[in-house]
Amino acid sequence: MTEPHVRVRDLRKSYGAFTALDGISFDIERGETFALLGPNGAGKSTTIEILEGYRDRTGGEATVLGVDPQHGGLAWKSRIGIVLQSSGESGNVSVQEQLAYFAKIYPQHRDVDEVIAAVGLTDKAKTRIKQLSGGQRRRVDVALGIIGKPEMLFLDEPTTGFDPEARREFWELIRGLKRDGTTILLTTHYLDEAAQLSDRAGVIAGGKLIDIGRIDEIGGQEARVPLVRWRDPSGLHEERTTEPAAVVARLFASEKGEPRDLEVVRPSLEDIYLDLVGQYEKDNA
Amino acid sequence: MNAISLGIDRARYETKIYFRQGDTIFFTFLFPIVMLSIFSVAFSAAGNFGTDAHGHGGISAAAFYVPGMIAAGILLSGVQNLAVDIANERGDGTLKRLSGTPLPVLSYFIGKIGQVLVTSILQIALLLLVAHFAFGVALPTSGQKWGTFVWVYLLGITTSAVIGIALSRVPRTGRSATAVIIPIVLVLQFISGVYLQFSQLPVWLQNVASVFPLKWMAQGMRYVFLPDGFKTVEQGGVWNLGLIAIVLGIWLVAGLIAARFTFRWIRKDA
């Protein structure tokens, strides 16, 4: 077993009296894609920024590629790629010029034109960045994050502002990086994105990791029990059951025919996530 | 070595961006040339500066203002340009992005100083061309004067650049950068003999100005570009090149120390 690319133990961060991270622990294995999910202000960005070296932790341990990010030198920085949550640079350079310049900073880099093509900006290559739309600028951010052939890529809400088609293209790009063996840490508000891309996910709420596991394990068995919904004269009914077919058959027999608005629903990651966070907030109210 | 070649790449990139920003081109690059033109035209009817008792001799307004405008150009290209530019880059996320890459801080500094050198040499060349060809200002002919020009210029521009880097920490946000930096630079220009004749300022104000580098850059440039007889109105009646070198040297070292110890890519935990 090789050492995990990210190792976090009892990570803590406070700002004065406010505790942003209250002891979280997880590993990300080499080549794995890991998603951090959680409501705004839960501590996702604090976690990712500590791992990127932008913030100093108050307690606990963290290593990225075997190095403490608080003391990550230039050699370490050349092995990681960072896509920040926002950027507002004046953008008086073209997409091509910007990537060609950043490529020079890294000891190894990808081909500039290939990266521009991978983020779908080939026909905007000669356009100044300030003239691009928000979604296009975001793609430049992603391109800058991967130009240096990172072994470890951080993506902080990378697809905010993308249209659905751009989001799907972006997913393809990330799958390609994953096939090349890049380890990825992703934060996102889009649960379908986490389900599409990541091998495992952690859910953060109130600075604590409230669940962690493979995407098909999050929330536990209980949370995945299907739901049968139907309508009768007294209103809408729901029944959680591990045997939905039997419930439907019983309804069919007792209702003497087709039940109205019948649905069998398997909770999506989004339903499970909302349950988890809702439960956490209720317990800590 | 790698940090130096990355610095040269950065200087090339920065210089390209510099000339794409309309506001810096006007307020930093063309400003001294515009001011020289205004003063030359405004005072052209007032007769020559430094005439003898009978109103003969002396030099034109344009010739009189050239040294001050060169000194102002050095200050603007170094201090104003860099302090505002770096504060903006801190505000808009450029520095945060760079701090996540393997770009050494030294290369970033080399890039900024390289951009300042290239743009300010072009600025002064343009200023001298305008002064000579549009306003008929005679330029020095002796190699010794040009030698002095070179060292005062290089010492002045390097000092201004490091002071600019150090001052970039002062504005709290990128937006407030121009509001914080421009008044400092403007006041210095008024008290250091750029717009107003230094010898006519009250002595106490001359003494205040003598603490800051601009007064000395302007004095060095007056030595280069004005007739030798003008030294009688300098402090103590001498050009005092030695003191120019000493004061600028002290500011250079102080600026380097301040830049080295205060520069951070980002304010952690801001």
Image (tube, coloured by chain):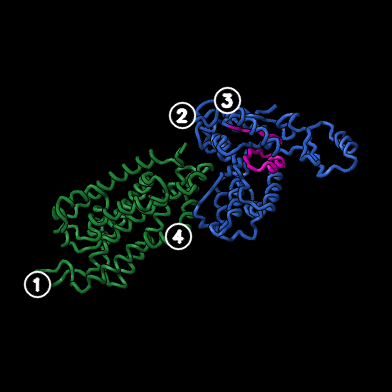
The three-letter code of the residue at mark 3 reads: Asp
What residue is at 41 percent from the left and 41 percent from the top? B263
Q: Residues within 10 Å of mark 2 (few under 14, many from 20)?
A: few
> What residue is shown with label 2?
A17
- Disc number lying in front (3 or 2): 2
User: Tag 2, which secondary structure?
Assistant: loop
> What residue is shown with label 4?
B21
Instruction: Work out whether disc 1 and disc 4 sit on a shared chain.
Output: yes
The hue used for chain B is: green
The three-letter code of the residue at mark 2 reads: Ala
Residue toward you, B178 or A5 = B178
Residue toward you, A135 or B104 = A135
- Disc number lying in front (4 or 2): 2
Please tell me whether residue A76 is drawn above or below residue B26 in the rendered image.
Answer: above
- Magenta span: A178-205
Labels 3 and 2: the sequence-earlier one:
3
> What residue is shown with label 1?
B54
As measured in the structure, the alpha-carbon distance from the residue carrying label 2 to the one carrying label 1 is: 78 Å
As measured in the structure, the alpha-carbon distance from the residue carrying label 3 to the one carrying label 2 is: 18 Å
Q: Residue furthest front?
A: A233
Question: Is residue A105 covered in magenta?
Answer: no
- Disc 2: which chain? A
- Disc number lying in front (2 or 1): 2
Q: Is residue B113 visible?
A: no
As measured in the structure, the alpha-carbon distance from the residue carrying label 4 to the one carrying label 2 is: 44 Å
Question: Is residue A186 covered in magenta?
Answer: yes
Question: Where does residue B93 sit, x and y in percent of width and height?
Answer: 49, 47
Please tell me whether residue A201 is drawn above or below residue B163 in the rendered image.
Answer: above
What residue is at 63 percent from the left and 29 percent from the top? A210
> What residue is shown with label 3?
A10
User: Tag 4, which secondary structure?
Assistant: loop
